[in-house]
């Protein structure tokens, strides 16, 4: 199991001797994969949607739009180099802060400029998940009502509402030509309790939406008709057995191949730690997730790599590789590792640039078709030890100006 202590230890070793006392900013690290499920429930809370029927079908045309505004995380920086940006989507959506009422912020990848800010429609108070299609202007957001969870009995009541009320889904379309965004409610017949939703992923052609549902179920919804298929891991239960997804609210637990035939997901064992990345054949008959999915990567028995990756584990759109961050045992080091989706073994030799000397990586956020170009975030080594997001290609890491530091929910 990769613990928070492991991650901190690796980061500090990478920056040993270069970080002045108390100079590093606070880090947002994912919850421990092995932490008891019951203790993580409040992180999965997504609150009541009492007026879902009234809002169904509504189109929000008046959105708060801001042009040319740079990231609030620091002063404006120059645009990233055109060579680094080749093939990378021009825009992305990041949630402003997943721990408090969050808006969806659309940014230009090259400059970090905010091109549009989208507020959740009433009665929903916050967005909690975001996912993007392959066209670079279609996204899907999960929304909820929101109450701050305070201490005492009132806080417990708010947490109960968070856990038991359903989630609403919205399609977000951005028009680069006009700089406008359009939010449309999606008609999802099934009411999904907030505490059951562990992640979402829209298909590359934006026709289907995949949901990771606690404890161990995947549902794929055809958005044009509302029809859905479910696959469940046999024997899974809230208190025992495996579950699907990362340790929420960390990362994107689902990823599609470009042809829409395969969905990759992490499977976490009862003992803690993501031990497998599974590949679900969406044309498989039946409803057994165990029968329809095969092991793409097993993190058991790899020797120098601890069981379970750090952060996301994404299948490349061409379906050939699974890209993630692994933690080596000796020396203790986090690095980008790509596995063959066919054999489950690390690619040998590793592709150039998997361990840039100036970055301790923590999560892969996006991959191009073959995995040769990645967007990753991590900790920059050196005196500042700052969190940074950037493009990794052929041994060169290019920071993205204005990229938000909180990247738990971001979609290209």
Image: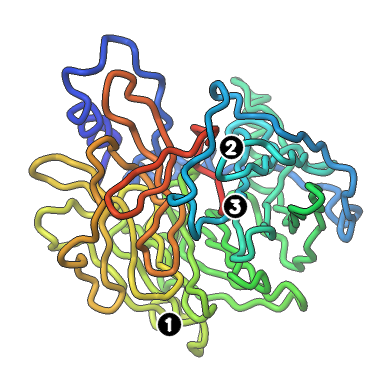
Residue 182, percent across and down? 82, 53
Residue 256, percent across and down? 50, 70
- Residue 272 visible at all: no
Dot 2: what SS?
Answer: loop
Residue 179 in the figure: left or right of residue 207: right
First in residue order: circle 2 vs circle 3 = 3
Mark number for residue 90?
3
Residue 79 in the figure: left or right of residue 276: right
Q: Furthest-bottom residue in view?
A: 285
Which of these two is toward me, 67 or 86? 86
In the picture of the structure, the residue carrying the numbered disc 2 is 112
Q: Furthest-front residue in view?
A: 82
How packed mark 2 is, by other alpha carbons closer than 10 Å (few <14, some 14-19, many 20 or more), is: many
Q: Residue at x 34, y 60 (%)?
A: 323
Q: Residue at x 78, y 62 (%)?
A: 186
Residue 107, percent across and down? 64, 42
Q: Residue at x 68, y 58 (%)?
A: 137
In the picture of the structure, the residue carrying the numbered disc 1 is 292
Quarter holding the C terminus is: bottom right
Disc 1 and disc 3 in contact, CB within 8 angstroms: no
First in residue order: circle 1 vs circle 3 = 3
């Amino acid at each position: 199991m990769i613990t928070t202590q492991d991650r901190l230890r690796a980061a500090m070793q990478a920056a040993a001797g270069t970080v002045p006392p108390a100079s590093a900013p606070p880090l947002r690290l994912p919850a421990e994969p092995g932490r008891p499920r019951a203790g993580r429930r409040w992180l999965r809370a997504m609150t009541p949607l009492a007026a879902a029927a009234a809002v169904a079908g509504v189109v929000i045309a008046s959105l708060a739009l801001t042009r040319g505004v740079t990231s609030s995380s620091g002063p404006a920086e120059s645009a990233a180099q055109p060579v680094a940006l080749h093939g990378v989507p021009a825009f992305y959506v990041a949630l402003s802060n997943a721990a408090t009422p969050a808006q969806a912020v659309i940014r230009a990848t090259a400059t970090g400029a905010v091109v549009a800010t989208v507020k959740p429609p009433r009665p929903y108070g916050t967005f909690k998940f975001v996912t993007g299609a392959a066209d670079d202007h279609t996204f899907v957001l999960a929304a909820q009502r929101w109450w701050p969870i305070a201490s005492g009995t009132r806080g417990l009541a708010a947490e109960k509402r968070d856990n038991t009320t359903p989630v609403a889904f919205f399609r977000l379309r951005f028009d680069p030509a006009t700089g406008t965004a359009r939010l449309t409610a999606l008609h999802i017949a099934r009411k999904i309790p907030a505490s059951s939703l562990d992640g979402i992923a829209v298909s590359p052609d934006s026709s289907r939406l995949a949901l990771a549902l606690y404890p161990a179920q995947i549902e794929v919804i055809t958005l044009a008709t509302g029809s859905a298929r479910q696959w469940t891991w046999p024997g899974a239960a809230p208190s025992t057995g495996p579950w699907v997804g990362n340790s929420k609210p960390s990362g994107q637990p689902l990823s599609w191949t470009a042809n829409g035939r395969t969905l990759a997901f992490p499977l976490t064992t009862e003992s803690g730690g993501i031990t497998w990345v599974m590949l679900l054949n969406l044309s498989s008959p039946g409803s057994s997730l165990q029968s329809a999915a095969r092991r793409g990567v097993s993190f058991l028995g790899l020797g120098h790599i601890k069981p379970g990756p750090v952060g996301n584990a994404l299948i490349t759109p061409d379906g050939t590789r699974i890209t993630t961050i692994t933690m080596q045992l000796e020396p203790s080091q986090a690095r980008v590792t790509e596995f063959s989706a066919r054999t489950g073994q690390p690619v040998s030799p590793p592709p150039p640039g998997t361990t840039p000397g100036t970055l301790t990586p923590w999560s892969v956020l996006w991959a191009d078709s073959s995995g040769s170009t990645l967007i990753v975030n991590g900790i920059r080594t050196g005196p500042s030890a700052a969190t940074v997001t950037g493009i990794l290609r052929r041994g060169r890491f290019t920071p993205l100006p204005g990229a938000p530091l909180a990247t738990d929910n971001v979609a290209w």
